[in-house]
Image (cartoon, rainbow, N blue to C red):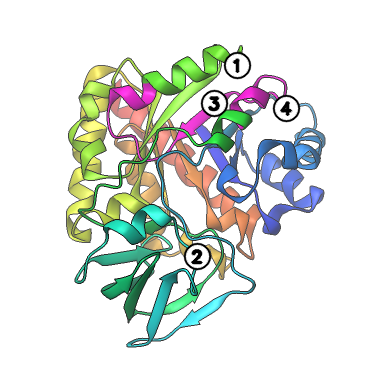
């Protein structure tokens, strides 16, 4: 089993990182939507020291064909029924979206924590009403269910990061919102051009399109990632557990390793102990055959990053032993 933590302000202290490794963390994820690989040089050195000689995997999560809001001067608190503008004169978003979204379109921000409805617009901007409010921070995800934005597989920033991957010791690249085999082949070619053929490709399944084409992706990626944040935005939430179970079964049949990620111990962003439901979720993912599990906000921005990693590893190892006992 591999156990990943996502870096961020919560684990910027080297001693915290050291405690996460001692708790059993085997890999680190860098979310490059918040800054390029060149900007993470200090992190690379800090992680290497904190590992204390332990081998570990280093994953970079590319921007890929994903939509995010831009930089905000300060976090915003959006209230229910509030009118907001996205685009020019308001919350910055990609111009592509302002030209395609029509009145009635649902927009989901920050893995669906916030919900807006488009009510109108003008060139370069969308007028929206807040359906489900909350705090919005820079560079959070933005999903437009049912809307095809025709985005390129890799951004210019992605290409720059891939060029540095080999020299920085990157062992794996996560590609968000994989839509089909072509996306993965495009990434593979980019890694080849960068002289990084040995870097593994992890395909993040975050949309209906990706889930429906899952089996066609086998062989083009080294590992599948059941990324439940935006995947949960793409369907009724109560359907998500069944989709995860069926995707896990397809990966097992094909002998393809897979990862489960998003909100696994989400309450530990605030609390030192997870909920019973969260522990059961981690256990279930491993019993379904997951080769790896990952924490995101829990370690990047939570109050208890090392404790969260400890619960992840202990629960995962309990499930791994039970899974192996059942296979004998």
Q: Give residue 7's position: percent from left, percent from top.
A: 64, 48
**Which quadrant of the structure image shows residue 278?**
bottom left
Say few, some or many: other residues with alpha carbon within 10 Å of mark 4 (under 14 / 14 to 19 / 20 or more): few
Query: Which residue, given by chain and number where applicable, does mark 2 sit on?
Result: 92
Q: Work out whether residue 48 or residue 129 is closer to the camera in this orientation and state it.
A: 129
Q: Work out whether residue 157 or residue 176 is closer to the camera in this orientation and state it.
A: 157
| Span highlighted in magenta in the image | 161-184
| Residue ID at (75%, 36%) | 44
| Residue ID at (59%, 43%) | 32
Looking at the rendered image, the disc whose residue lies closer to the viewer, 2 or 1, is 2
Query: Which residue, given by chain and number where applicable, does mark 4 sit on?
Result: 54
Q: Work out whether residue 324 or residue 29 is closer to the camera in this orientation and state it.
A: 29
Q: Is residue 229 magenta?
A: no
Mark earlier in primary sequence (2, 1): 2
**Pointer 2 with pointer 3, Cβ within 8 A:** no
Mark earlier in primary sequence (2, 4): 4
Say few, some or many: other residues with alpha carbon within 10 Å of mark 3 (under 14 / 14 to 19 / 20 or more): many
Q: Give residue 281's position: percent from left, percent from top.
A: 35, 51
Query: Which residue, given by chain and number where applicable, does mark 3 sit on?
Result: 172
**Pointer 1 with pointer 3, Cβ within 8 A:** no
Mark earlier in primary sequence (2, 3): 2
Q: Does residue 297 appear to the left or right of 149 in the view shown?
A: right
């Amino acid at each position: 089993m591999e156990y990943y933590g996502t870096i961020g302000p919560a684990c910027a202290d080297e001693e915290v990182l050291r405690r996460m490794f001692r708790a059993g963390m085997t890999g680190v994820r860098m979310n490059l939507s918040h800054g390029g690989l060149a900007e993470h040089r200090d992190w690379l050195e800090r992680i290497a020291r904190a590992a204390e000689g332990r081998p570990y995997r280093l994953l970079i999560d590319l921007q890929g064909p994903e939509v995010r809001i831009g930089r905000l001067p300060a976090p915003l608190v959006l209230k229910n029924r509030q009118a907001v503008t996205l685009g020019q004169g308001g919350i910055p978003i990609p111009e592509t979206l302002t030209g395609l979204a029509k009145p009635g379109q649902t927009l989901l921000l920050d893995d669906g924590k916030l919900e807006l409805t488009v009510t109108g617009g003008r060139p370069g901007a969308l007028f929206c009403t807040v359906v489900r409010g909350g705090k919005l921070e820079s560079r959070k995800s933005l999903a437009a269910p049912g809307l095809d934005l025709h985005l390129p597989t890799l951004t210019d920033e992605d290409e720059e990061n891939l060029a540095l991957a080999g020299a920085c010791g990157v062992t794996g690249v996560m590609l968000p919102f994989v839509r089909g085999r072509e996306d993965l082949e495009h990434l593979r070619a980019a890694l080849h051009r960068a002289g990084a053929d040995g870097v593994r490709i992890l395909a993040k399944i975050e949309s209906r399109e990706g889930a429906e084409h899952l089996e066609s992706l086998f062989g083009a990626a080294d590992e599948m990632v059941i990324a439940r944040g935006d995947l949960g935005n793409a369907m009724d939430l109560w359907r998500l557990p069944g989709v995860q179970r069926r995707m896990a079964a397809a990966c097992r049949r094909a002998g393809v390793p897979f990862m489960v990620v998003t909100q696994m111990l989400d309450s530990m962003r605030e609390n030192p102990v997870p909920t019973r439901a969260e522990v059961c979720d981690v256990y279930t993912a491993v019993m379904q055959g997951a080769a790896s599990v990952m924490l995101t906000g829990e370690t990047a921005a939570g109050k208890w990053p090392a404790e969260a990693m400890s619960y992840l590893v202990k629960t995962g190892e309990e499930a791994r032993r039970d899974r192996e006992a059942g296979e004998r």
